[in-house]
Amino acid sequence: MFAVIGLGNPGERFRYTRHNVGFDTIECLAERFNVKISKIKHKSIYGQTKINDENILLVKPQTFMNNSGICALEICNYYNISPENIIVIYDDIDIEFGSLRIRPKGSAGSHNGMKSIIYHLQCDDFPRVRIGIGRPNEGLDLADFVLNRFQKEDREIIDETIKKAADAVETIINYSVNKAMNEYNR
């Protein structure tokens, strides 16, 4: 079993913001596999599906970004999922806008949602799919930047990146993190 956890903030106010590209990727996967993200448990909303006979949970934590680890821990404990079968998708200001970076493990960097997951799971040994959202212009507060929506032309680019992120998740599940890294880390 895999848990695919897209990071974001709950509520209509945060929908389609830079910080919610993880949620957007979960929605993309749900649409592909005709899954309703409607079950409420483990401080999340989620849906279940199968990809090549592998049980998959598509998860959107409802704890707000900085407490995402609470949800991740509850999911892991309840379903007895080992960290290497958790795939976390999140926004990243430290990689080029519109790019993907897949890693099998690593630090949280400056991302508070990832810091929370690593803290609660007590490890960083799980795959992650990072989506480059760009950096704020000089003088713009980082929190304001990540909680704002994309401009129309940037939204079109990020929507394509979200589709690639969903492809990368499928590659991790069907093959391996290394294959996904080779295909999508460009």
Image: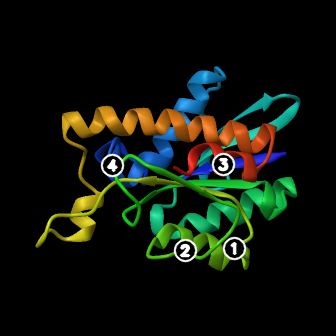
Ranked by sequence position, the earlier of labels 3 and 4 is: 4
Classify residue 100 as left or right of residue 125: left
Q: Which residue is mark 2?
A: 108
Cα gap from disc 3 to disc 1, whole angstroms: 21 Å
Ranked by sequence position, the earlier of labels 4 and 1 is: 4
Task: Label 2, secondary structure: give it.
Answer: loop
Cα gap from disc 3 to disc 4, whole angstroms: 32 Å
Q: Nearer the viewer, mark 3 or mark 1?
A: 3
Q: Is residue 108 above or below residue 145?
A: below
For disc 2, the neighbor class at 10 Å (few under 14, some 14 to 19, many from 20) is: some
Residue farthest along the left direction in this orientation: 139
Q: Is residue 25 above or below residue 10?
A: above
Q: Which residue is mark 3?
A: 182
Cα gap from disc 2 to disc 3, whole angstroms: 22 Å
Q: Which residue is mark 1?
A: 124
Q: Residue at x 38, y 46 (%)?
A: 98
Q: Nearer the viewer, mark 2 or mark 3?
A: 3
